[in-house]
Image (cartoon, rainbow, N blue to C red):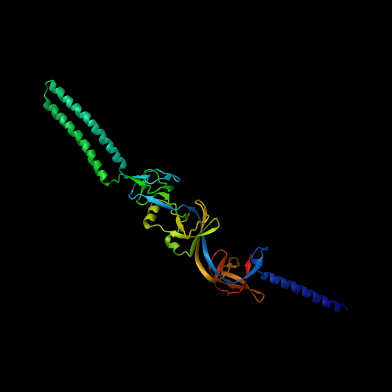
Amino acid sequence: MYKKILIPVLLLVCMCLFTACSADEEKTEDVALLEPANAKIETTYVTKMDISQVELHDGAVIPSIEEFSFEENGYLYGVFVEPGDKVYKGDVLAGLVGHDHQTILDLEDEIKELEENKVKLFEGYDLDLELVKLNGGDVSEKTLEIKQKKELAEFEIQQKKDRLEKLKETDIGYVSLVAPYDSVVAAVSSAGRNSYLSKGTAVVALETGETPMITCNDYIAESAYAKVYSCYAVVRGQRLELEYIPYTKNELKVIVNNGITPVTKFNISGYDDQEIYVGDYASVIEVKNFKADVLAIPQNAVYADATGDFVYEIKDGERIRRPVILGISDNANIEVLDGLEEGACIYVKN
């Protein structure tokens, strides 16, 4: 009797132990061990999608502008306008002088002063000579002395005139930058007085009154932009297609040589009076490495260890580790080059 009762009980205990062991074995295989204990595990499917890499840049809406520069190398005499100033055609915006400009001015003043003093000096010499004559003295010696003094004064003046002429042969003199039309000043150079400016350095920018432009703070080289799939800006929730405005080689050289960090400028393509205003913030978006219709999975489905990247595929109720070779990522999804087929069910870390 006891034996009959004991056998079913022992069988029941064994079944419970077996069930518990099986549960423990499943837990050791569960992917949650690779994540925090409270991580939620979900699944998704390998699908085809378009994928690309995106770069964001801070930018702004600026007025359409035209930049003006001097056609000679020289030293900035001064910028006579400020951003926001209204200017009219013919107004002088800035002045440029040569290296010897101040020396030339000083020489001109010295020569003028010597010429004035010479007149008074020579009048005094003539008066001295007349006094010698009136006193019955020998004027020959005095005449020679006065002649030598006059020649010395003339020689000093002529030396300065010759030097002045030589300086003027190579000096640019004073050059004015003049507004070619009525406008508003958009920007001016930060260069201070007497700063050296290379030919072509932008000094003043005037608004043209045309379609606004977009600028971004990061410089995108023309060669790099040529590889971009698309580029657009978002302003006030509106997408604006952009056209890249390249610098000429000389413009870029001048900018770099003057220690200025270049920005990237764009025209707005197909502008149709969208509600945007000068000064608005613009998010400039570069779409790079665009690939259409490629196998992709969520970025957070990927695990990695010393052997490389892998995912967990669910197949026939079992979890299978699959090594994968990955391509480009857009930070949300990542391209699968090898290791998975379309439609495969995989774990996703949530």
The count of marks equals 0
Which residue sits furthest right?
Answer: 1
- Image coords of residue 267 (percent x, y): 45, 57
**Quadrant of image for the C terminus:** bottom right
Q: Residue at x 41, y 49 (%)?
A: 205
- Residue 113: quadrant of the picture: top left
Judged left or right of residue 2, residue 214 is left
Q: Residue at x 21, y 30 (%)?
A: 119
Q: Residue at x 23, y 33 (%)?
A: 115
- Image coords of residue 13 (percent x, y): 79, 74
Which residue sits furthest top?
Answer: 135
- Image coords of residue 257 (percent x, y): 38, 52
**Quadrant of image for the N terminus:** bottom right
Judged left or right of residue 41, residue 121 is left
- The front one of 177 and 246 is 177
Judged left or right of residue 168, residue 309 is right
Q: Is residue 188 visible?
A: no
- Seen in the picture, residue 114 relative to 348 is either above or below; the reply is above
- Image coords of residue 244 (percent x, y): 44, 59
Q: Residue at x 22, y 41 (%)?
A: 162
